[in-house]
Image (tube, grey):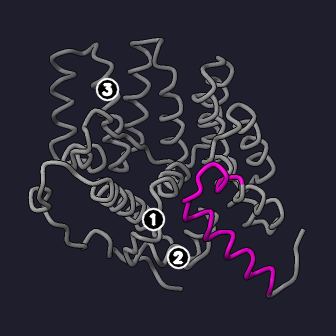
Amino acid sequence: MPRLKKTIANKTRKPSHARGGRKRSSANFVEPVRELLMRRVSREIDRRDWTQSQAAEFLGVTQPRISDLTRGLTENFTIDALVQWIGLLGMELQIDTKSGGNQSSISTWFDVSEDTIPFYTKLIAVSPQNTDSYSKRAQAYHQLGQYDLAIGDYTRAMELSANLQHLRINRAQSYICLGQYGAAFIDCDQLIAQKPDDETCAWAYITRAAAQQAQLDDSAALSDYAKAIELLPNFAAAYLQRGALYERINNYKAAIRDFSKVLELEASNIQAQQHLEHIRKKSGEHGDDE
């Protein structure tokens, strides 16, 4: 089977100042973000040395979807879909919402430079009680695949402030990347037991579901997706990820219900549309399943 190639990182982009005008159109803002997300997902899949089939099975999608990713076909992906893949891969997502659409700021969040970790290390040396510096350095460690160091910094940040328990989700993602699923479960379980706000709790359930899927415990993952949806009935990401799991286990009727719900919430969600198209083609070839 073919190995994944690093084609996305080699795509040429014009510098932001070459696009003209003081204001960006929404399309000009979305495209660089989408490309950055695709590069991150592609690098992570390549780092794990997966074949396209292995990546497709883990993410609950078809192999042609992974092929589109490796060929850099950005028009075939939505930002929501890529964010969901990043979650399933146990990667972190941080966007500077105050950037006003500035691409250089977005790039800083998504692509860690060689100066990022030394910068926060210096800040910690000057102010060792600065929880934000530990959290930001942990994010950088995670993005570089240094998951043990990320876990250490998340732990230290939570030791310094009891108000940062939501970082258990981040730490659980690092544990998942190390294959330490028991530790990931503990973090998610403890956060859920604290009864945080519904959105935080829903993300804890989704993170735990990712760990369940990594262990091929599909029934437990489905249970956690259901709990996330119970908390946030209009949580499109949960429906999409659960639908992908249903599709992978050939429960097409349930998958169609979930993908249809995604389109009810987000009419332009391309990934849900493509999943539905694939299911209908497959059902037509082999007859109805489940």
Residue 208 sits above or below residue 247 on the image: above
Quick check: marks 2 and 3 in contact, CB under 8 Å? no
> Dot 2 lies on which element?
helix
Q: Mark 2: which amino acid?
A: Gln
SS at badge 3: helix
Identify the disc placed on residue 52.
2
Q: Quadrant of the N terminus?
A: bottom right
**In the image, is 66 to the left or to the right of 144?**
right
In terms of sequence position, does the residue under pointer 2 or pointer 3 come before the other? 2
Q: Which residue is mark 1?
A: 45
Q: Tell me which amino acid carries mark 1.
A: Ile
Horizontal relation, residue 165 to residue 140: left or right: right
Classed neighbour count for the residue bearing mark 1: other residues with Cα under 10 Å, few (<14), some (14–19), many (≥20): many
Q: CA distance from mark 1 to mark 2?
A: 9 Å
Residue at position x 60%, y 41% in the image: 207
Q: Quadrant of the C terminus?
A: bottom right
Q: Which residues are magenta?
A: 261-284
Residue type at mark 3: give it. Answer: Tyr
- Which of pointers 1 and 2 lies earlier in the amino acid sequence? 1
Q: Sequence-wise, which precedes: disc 3 or disc 1?
A: 1
Q: Residue at x 75, y 34 (%)?
A: 230
* Residue 244 placement: quadrant: bottom right
The residues tagged by marks 3 and 1 sit, at their Cα atoms, a distance apart of 27 Å
Residue 214 seen in the current view: no
Q: Which residue is mark 3?
A: 134
Q: Element at badge 1?
A: helix
Majority SS type along the magenta span: helix
